[in-house]
Image: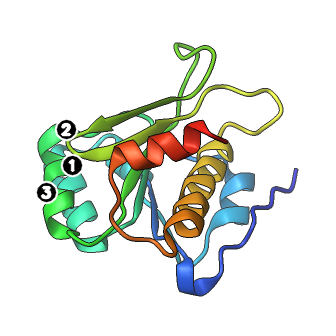
Amino acid sequence: MAHSLLVIPKESSMRILITYPVAEDVLLGILNDNVIYRPDLQTKGDRFVTKALTELRPDVLIAQKLPDEQVVKSWVLATPDSARFIVQNGNSQYAGEAKHFSFAGVPVFTTVPDDRIHPDIQPLILAERVHTKRSHVWGGVRRVSFLQTKKYLSLL
């Protein structure tokens, strides 16, 4: 089954770090210069996750579980001008609407199961939506408050 995503123009592309295993057919459709695929980080310790976030400097972390708070704080310190955010790939414990909250000063957007969308594609769609809305509303990606983002997304 082929999957496709909208392509974000290069000038506003976001660097995405995916830290869990993704289905091979999906992976073939999403790998690009701006997608960093490190499924090994799901099981490695905080030191490795911190190193990946601070050295690779992604704009978006897509993970199944949130990293330790200190890991996220290190990421924030390493990327002070980034409009970074986290997409947490939800699971069956999350019913209803997606959750939005802040963790260690970083906005987190949680997906919820949707039978119409492949579970490995859903967090990428959400990341693209958040990034695109931020770029559109604020005239380019820059650091904005979680409350501004949450307020805008609630209007969609």
User: Residue flagged by tag 1: what amino acid is it?
Assistant: Val
Looking at the picture, tell me which residue is in the foreground, 42 or 60.
60
Residue drawn at (45%, 71%), measured in percent from left and top?
A: 141
How far apart marks 3 and 2 lie (CA) works out to 10 Å
Contact? badges 1 and 2 (CB < 8 Å): yes
The disc, 3 or 2, on the residue closer to the chain's N-terminal end is 2
Label annotation for residue 150: none
Q: Is residue 64 left or right of residue 68?
A: right
Residue drawn at (46%, 70%), measured in percent from left and top?
A: 15
Task: Give SS at disc 2.
Answer: loop
Q: Position of residue 139 (x, y in %)?
A: 52, 74
Label annotation for residue 72: 1
How far apart marks 1 and 2 lie (CA) works out to 7 Å
Task: Give SS at disc 1.
Answer: helix
Mark 3, Cα crowd under 10 Å, few <14 / some 14-19 / many 20+, is some
Report the number of discs. 3
Looking at the picture, tell me which residue is in the foreground, 132 or 40.
132
Q: Position of residue 92 (x, y in %)?
A: 58, 16
Q: Is residue 68 left or right of residue 126?
A: left
Q: Residue furthest right?
A: 1
Q: Residue furthest bottom?
A: 11
Residue drawn at (17%, 68%), measured in percent from left and top?
A: 78
Task: Give SS at disc 3.
Answer: helix
Q: Position of residue 61 (x, y in %)?
A: 40, 53
Quarter of the image where one finds residue 113: top right
Contact? badges 3 and 2 (CB < 8 Å): no
Looking at the picture, tell me which residue is in the foreground, 105 or 7.
105
Q: Which residue is mark 2?
A: 68
Contact? badges 1 and 3 (CB < 8 Å): yes
Q: Is residue 113 visible?
A: yes
Q: Which residue is mark 3?
A: 74
How far apart marks 1 and 3 lie (CA) works out to 5 Å
